[in-house]
Amino acid sequence: MQVSTACCLDGAHQYVLDKMPYASKIRRVGRFVNGFVQDNEKMSTYDNEGGVALPIGAVERETGLSKDVLRKWETRYGFPLPERDGSGERIYPADQVARLRLIKRLLDSGLRPSRVVTQRPEVLAELAERRGSRSDVGEQNALGGGFLDALRAHDAPLLRQGLNRLLRDEGLRVFVQDKLSALIRLVGEAWARGELDIHEEHLFSEIIQSMLRGVVDELNDPLGRPRILMTTLPGESHGLGLLMVAALASLETAYCLSLGTQTPLQDIRGAVEVLAIDVVALSFSASFPARAVSSALAQVREMLPDNVEVWVGGEGAVRSARPGDGIVVVDSLSKVPVRIAAWRSDHPAL
């Protein structure tokens, strides 16, 4: 799960089904699903110490770090150090997976890979504890309804009830910008410390996404402007932040459409043409290769009409994207209404 209050356009599961009959996209999705199944069929094995070792696809899903990132770190930093199974495929010992989880959480908090990837586990744990302790009292009080306890008990109805109460009491804007962002951060920190299992974090994420989809569906106005297409590029699977952005944008009477995550460039271009899109909003998390952000944005900018703006956010975008020439960096959730107002000021006739 990748969300930061400092990096708002940080990608989501599909919450508005795209009904365009793109045969090419269906074929790509089919290949992706087949690849996922094949990868998932590679069962966990055992490392040299007798512990459970995971294949690279399972590590990607467990940690949120892409396969490309794992391979690049292996070459650049000498970590992780995967073993090989009988077929010569990479397998990652349990202790390395735990270390990668800590690294991912530290990256989400704003640290750079060069600072943390090579650190010893005890140093990483100390860094995580130190940065986790910076959460202010208000964030801790946001969990006063027992969200973590309900999560550990797998009590989904109680979680939904507490979140809906928080939304009702605080209003959508404060709920998304402040309370929900704090909850997500605290759940992520608890997971990084080993206090929550990955399935519990996923449960929390799914409940939030379901809740926010309902909010967006209720507020979304097909006549609203700007018309914002939200997605991530291939290789970027994080998208919860985009859904938070959609909720705030819908509150400003913008119209938000989602293609889900990891949409090929040609399908983004097709959607822009068919749906009369004003803005393409993209998200790049901290795990997206920094050097690839600028080149990816250049390709997106080149293929889109000049009158279509590109808004980017997420930890990776804030670090690496260069604003200008139709590229707008939106570096926090609070900037979403500001950016929408600026667009409307630039397009008074619409």
Image: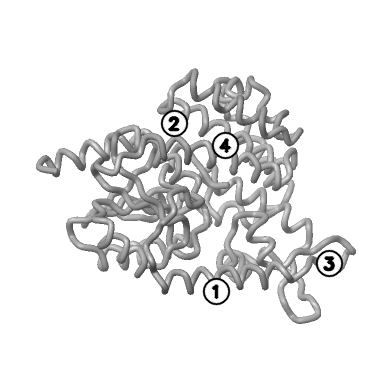
Find out whether the residues at labels 4 and 2 contact each other: C-beta distance under 8 Å. no
Residue type, label 3: Asp
| Secondary structure category for the residue under label 4 | helix
Quick one: label 1, few (<14), some, or many (20+) residues within 10 Å? Answer: few
Q: Earlier in the sequence, mark 4 or mark 3?
A: 3
In primary-sequence order, the first of circles 1 and 4 is: 1
Relative height, residue 320 to residue 111 (above, below): below
Which residue type carries mark 2?
Answer: Gln
Residue 258 or 110: which is nearer the viewer?
Answer: 258
Q: Is residue 166 above or below residue 313?
A: above
In the rendering, at what x and y percent does residue 100 appear? 67, 55
Name the disc covering residue 184, or none: 4
Q: CA distance from mark 4 to mark 3?
A: 33 Å
Whether residue 76 is visible: no
**Location of residue 314 with respect to 151 vertically, above or below:** below
Disc tally is: 4
Q: Nearer the viewer, mark 1 or mark 4?
A: 1
Q: To which residue does mark 1 refer?
A: 31
If you read the primary sequence from the N terminus, does the residue marked by circle 4 or circle 2 appear first? 2
State which tag comes first along the sequence, 1 or 2.
1
Question: Disc 2 marks which residue?
Answer: 177
- Label 4: few (<14), some (14–19) or many (≥20) C-alpha neighbours in 10 Å: many
| Distance between mark 4 and mark 2 Cα atoms | 11 Å
Q: Quadrant of residue 56?
A: bottom right
Coloring scheme of the render? one colour
SS at mark 1? helix
Question: In whole angstroms, how far apart are the C-alphas of marks 1 and 2?
Answer: 37 Å
CB atoms of marks 4 and 3 within 8 Å: no
Identify the amino acid type marked 4. Ile
Q: Position of residue 189 (x, y in %)?
A: 64, 38
| Sequence-first tag of 3 and 2 | 3
Residue 125, given in percent of the width and then of the height, sits at 70, 43
